[in-house]
Image (cartoon, rainbow, N blue to C red):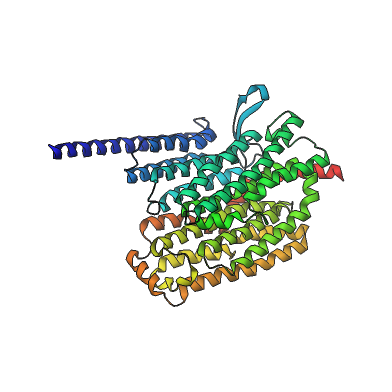
Amino acid sequence: MQTELENLQASTELLKRRLLLTLLIFLLSGVVIVSLGVFFDKISYPVLSTLIFFPVVGSGIILLIKREQEELIKIASLIIAVIEFMLSLPLYLSFDRNSTAMQFREEYMWIPQWGIKYSLGIDGISVLFVLLSSLLTILCVLVSWNEINKKVKEFYISLLITHSAMIGVFMSLDAFLFYIFWEAMLIPMYLIVGVWGGPNRLYAAIKFFLYTFIGSLFMLIGIIVLYIYTGTSDILKLSQFAYPYKMQLWLFWAFLAAFAVKVPMWPVHTWLPDAHTEAPTAGSVILAGILIKMGAYGILRFNIPMFPEATVAMTPVMLILSVIAIVYGALICLVQKDLKRLIAYSSVSHMGFVTLGIFALNHQGVQGGILQMINHGIVTGALFLCVGIVYQRTHTREIAKYGGLATVMPLYSAFFMIFTLASIGLPGTNGFIGEFLILLGAFKSWKIMSVLAATALITGAAYMLWLFQRVFFEKTNRYISEHINEDGDLNTREIIILLPLILAVFWIGFFPNALLGFMDLSVKELLNQFNSVIGVMK
């Protein structure tokens, strides 16, 4: 009798699993049909809202699965992430590169008495970050497959909701909606670091939360001031107003308080190494790949178009801070003993290049800055994935304990080498063209700053190549060798994780116009608007 009951329960669970997977596959098939329909202009649907809220709906499906069914939770999360990526493909396939207007617009009155709207749209800048976020979310699900062993359901729900909030930031055309998505990202990201992180996870999570939250309060004050002054929270309309110079200065710093923390700019960068070091691999990839790009994106969307006079006045300060971040981040990488901490500090240096390009305030610089944001998300995200993969075998990130990995993990070593070369900007990889455009733009406007920043390229090559030498080519550590031999080289799942990023490194490296063509007109429109105001000033 007991055996029959157990068999019945097992059959019921199997039936539930098959029904759920059938439902998810059905959704996936529907997405393929709808995506193709949008591409061929046969179907019109709110693609941006779907992209934002589909992972939330998917989280609801995962919530219905018993927490004991961890394998099913992982499979469901992967299918949801793949569907989300396929939903984002129409943005790429049917995007009009010859238009400066916001595309895929959605606008509904949200709070009529205040004139606040639920307004979404993307241009040639924001579309790239939506696509990158969708791709990285799939890889985060895969890399967490064996790494996350506690509260699995809650982890994948947090991951999907984080993705929804982040792409909501890139799509928002209303300042209050922008702020809501900006803050909504905090809670799931806090949980990812604080619950599934390393030994000092609570310290890192609280530090991340406080830095970001306090900076965001200044942005909220700035949004309220803009709303009171103009009577609107529409970001596009706010960019068309002429604000008094003193007001611009105050608002420039109010918004920068939020954006500088996210970038992170020196000296408000100190939360980043701690958060990266303690976060699980997926958390580090999200932080490096997308979250810190939100700060630079905010500068492009708010500071430069809305406060052009203040931007010109503060440009020397911003360039100095950028160069300090570039040089400081590179130098401090030379003394790091932890793999993740070294890559985290390299992000400070690389993002310094991004702000250098943006505040060069010319076409090459701004384009280079945006392209470098995408490149950094790909390469640094890949490096964190590589560290997570080897950490699962060795359970240590201390560089001194490594050595000789090229012998025991040759395929892994080849992948890591490519990402290392891309990180230092080797011609033919995606890192080269971004840094080249940034330095070209900076040299046109601020020669001394460009030369100082260029010195960090040498330091960057030094710390990355030295890292590669110590980890892969020195004498093999016996402890490492024993642990590696248990699992061997990269498995199929790990190859699938890293292969898309390898392809992206060379695709962008050899065909940069694949991305530059998207952002070209949007950058020109931004700078034309900025220069027209500055021309009137002069």
Above or below, 217 relative to 504: above
* Residue 375, image x, y percentages: 57, 55
Counting every numbered tag in the picture gives 0
**Going 77% across and 35% down the picture, which residue do you hit?**
241
Above or below for 138 versus 424: above
Residue 428 visible in the picture: no
Rendered image quadrant of residue 112: top right
x, y percent for residue 498: 45, 57
Tell me, yes or no, if residue 113 can be seen here.
yes
Point out residue 47 in the picture as x, y percentages from the top left corner.
Answer: 52, 34
Report the quarter where the N terminus lies. top left
Q: Outermost residue, right direction?
A: 538
The residue lying toward the viewer, choosing from 48 and 111, is: 111
> Percent x, y for residue 254?
72, 43
Pick whichever, 423 or 397, lies toward us.
397
Q: Quadrant of residue 448?
A: bottom right
Seen in the picture, residue 264 relative to 28 is either above or below; the reply is below
Q: Identify the residue at horizontal 68%, vertical 54% (top origin).
A: 355
In front of the other: 24 or 303: 303
